[in-house]
Amino acid sequence: MMSIQVTTLPNGLRIATDTMHDAESVVVGAWVGVGTRHEPWNANGVAHLVEHMMFKGTKSRSAYALSTAIENKGGQMNAHTTREETAYYARVLPEETGNALDIVADMMRHSVFDAKELDREKQVVIQEIGRDLDSPEDLAFEMMHSLAMPKQKIGRSILGSAKVIAKLPRGVITDYVARYYNAANMVIVATGKIEHAAFIAMAKKRFGGLARGKKPVEEKAHIRGGALVTPKDIEQTHIILGFAGPGYHSKEIYATQLLSVILGGSSASRLFQKVREKRGLVYTVSSAHAAFSDAGIFQIYAGTDPKRLRELMPVMIDELVDLRSHVAKGELDRAKSQLRADFLMGNESVMRRAEMLGHQILAYGKPVPAERVLSRLNAVTQEEVQDMARKIFAKKPILTALGPVDELENYKALARRLAA
């Protein structure tokens, strides 16, 4: 019997459950297909501010009542905002499923966005922005996104700027929620010790009257190369070397994920072994592929002593060049095993399964069977990974550097080395 079931209500709202009979908890949540990418031009940060405000009171519950309704029963509640999605979720004991869904529904449908609460929460978010500005690694990644996707909503900060947040009118927030928090753009998810039919009855009662609405229209993302080098008097230099890559709808996404694992996805990866273990040039080095619906950024991050910059960059680039023609069967097999194990071990987590289910239905319109994901990963060949290395690393590089940068090779020289 398939553990995942999806039912669409008459108003277009999708209700998805993933039954785990041996679980001792349930995750209940609302995944909404809206994020930084969908904000008005003059309201960067509104998606994240809305996430905060959803916890600040409804027509029938105060902020304190919302939190204690879950926590008094031993549960936990949280939320997150990305460039394309916003999610709200509670993890509770099975007998508290209805109560948790009540709270999520109340927040989604009846939040009041009280003006005094809004003023207070703006100050909380402004402090969060300040914290990230004080974190060189976080700031370097923000710089990288703005450089790679300039003058595009998707490239802007998820948190927004303190100046914009401070002046954001309440009407912009309520308009944003009215436009995007609708049945067509939302998925209600339950994973763990839950029965589909029982959960559908709960969801119909609480969400059956939600307006249908429609999904947001997205401007196509465009990834560009360039350099953004910012001198800063700190102990380390933070480097991100990025390249345009495929979005998560592309068939090339599996080869790209494997390429990332081989290059810098684990302690056995090329960069970790050659840059950290053999030469001691960094404490942290890694690679990852950030995939959006229609584009992606393959990114390599390193934090290093400024005096080691001159030695670090050539070693990193040599590995990128080598991957175009040399991927050993052993390292590809190891990368496949790592991704397979991560996927299957993640399936033991009630929260991880909720996150995957919510994202998959928003992204693909349906759940993606685990067998299909693993089969496609396993089918990737050495030649396909090398081909992705040639495609990705031939793109104009995206170089971000923050910290002491006197020893950093200039962008044109770095690009020539990659093109060789």
Image (cartoon, rainbow, N blue to C red):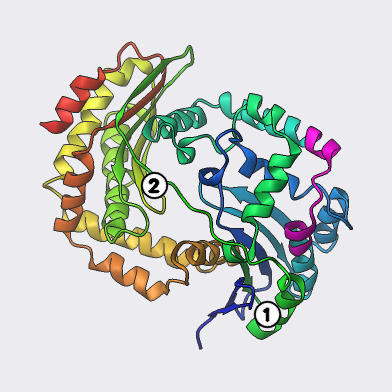
Residue 243: which disc? none
The vertical placement of 63 against 121, above or below, is: below
Secondary structure under the numbered disc 2 in the rendered image: loop
> Taking 385 as reference, is 80 left or right?
right
Quadrant for residue 239, please give it: top left
Three-letter amino acid code of the residue under disc 2: Lys
Counting residues from the start of the chain, the first of labels 2 and 1 encountered is 1
Mark 1 surroundings within 10 Å by alpha-carbon count, few (fewer than 14), some (14 through 19), many (20 or more): many
Mark 2 surroundings within 10 Å by alpha-carbon count, few (fewer than 14), some (14 through 19), many (20 or more): few
User: Within the magenta stretch, is there residue 268?
Assistant: no
Say which residue appears at 21% left-offset and 40% top-offset.
393
Secondary structure under the numbered disc 1 in the rendered image: helix
Say which residue appears at 25% left-offset and 17% top-offset.
410
Say which of 202 and 112 sits in front: 112
Main secondary structure along the magenta-highlighted residues: helix
The vertical placement of 417 against 213, above or below, is: above
Disc 2 designates what residue? 220
The quadrant of the image that shows the C terminus is: top left
